[in-house]
Image (tube, helix red, strand yellow):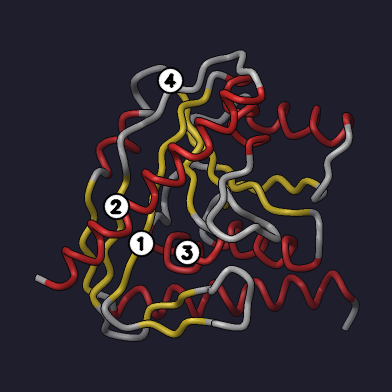
Amino acid sequence: MDHSKGISVKGFLLARFSRLLRKTWRVHIEGQDYLDGYYTNGRRCLIGFWHGKYAPIFPLLEGYDALVITSLSTRGSILGEICRSFGYKNAQIPDEPKLDSFKQLLHDLKPMKVSGTALDGPLGPYHKTKPSLIRLCGMLGLDMVPVTVSSSRSIKASKRWDKLEVPLPFSRVCLIFGEPIPIPSRLKHSELQTFSKHIDQELDELQTRAEAILRR
């Protein structure tokens, strides 16, 4: 099996497994109206989540017209195949994008009402929003919409840098969208850091809320 076909098969099988898991979960979603509004209100957004949370988010949001940004790597290509299996578009960029790849990303994002990516991906640091993504939102006029997910029972890959979590079958799963955060078009370096820390805090607070809901 050649490399590209192997990536396609892995992506297809992982997406199918995720879809089967999704059918067993008892799901609670809050703030979904924030996301739905972007398809009608004339604005655009980037959904931001932690890398370790992507596994349940993809199947939970199946059916939305969205573009997911992944890294230009074997793992990013597999994630791209998973995205396409759920009906999302995919754009891949190098870990350290050059001008041409950045221009291509801008081209891919412009027609999309909703895009999404891991804010601390693809290689960390863990739970730290990359300022470059804040700058990207400002350049394109995208709001940032933080989202997180928690489950009553899950498998956690503690040896991975992102602590990837996958809810177990028949778990209770809570997905929460935070309030949209408008990003100014021009930000100084210090302002980028301030926005990054603010989004980190928002995601932490959403996570605490999701876990509290599951304890009820």
Q: CA distance from mark 1 to mark 2?
A: 6 Å
Under tag 1, what secondary structure? Answer: strand
Which of the two residues, 118 or 207, is positioned nearer the viewer here? 207
Q: Residue at x 18, y 70 (%)?
A: 214
Check contact, mark 1 vs mark 2: CB within 8 A: yes
Q: What residue is pinned by disc 3?
A: 53
Q: Neighbour class for label 2 at 10 Å: few (<14), some, many (≥20)?
A: many
Check contact, mark 3 vs mark 1: CB within 8 A: yes
Q: CA distance from mark 4 to mark 1?
A: 24 Å
Q: What residue is pinned by disc 4?
A: 43
Residue 116's tag is: none
Q: What residue is pinned by disc 2?
A: 176
Image quarter for residue 166?
bottom left
Q: Of label 4 and label 3, which has the lower sequence position?
A: 4
Q: Of label 4 and label 1, which has the lower sequence position?
A: 4
The x, y position of residue 17, in whole percent, is 50, 80
Q: Residue at x 66, y 63 (%)?
A: 81
Question: Which three-letter amino acid code belongs to the residue tagged 3?
Answer: Lys
Check contact, mark 4 vs mark 1: CB within 8 A: no
Q: Of label 4 and label 2, which has the lower sequence position?
A: 4
Question: Which three-letter amino acid code belongs to the residue tagged 2?
Answer: Ile
Q: Of label 1 and label 2, which has the lower sequence position?
A: 1
Check contact, mark 4 vs mark 2: CB within 8 A: no
Q: What residue is pinned by disc 1?
A: 149
Under tag 4, what secondary structure? Answer: loop
Q: CA distance from mark 4 to mark 2?
A: 20 Å
Question: Which three-letter amino acid code belongs to the residue tagged 1?
Answer: Val
- Say left or right for 65 vs 23: right
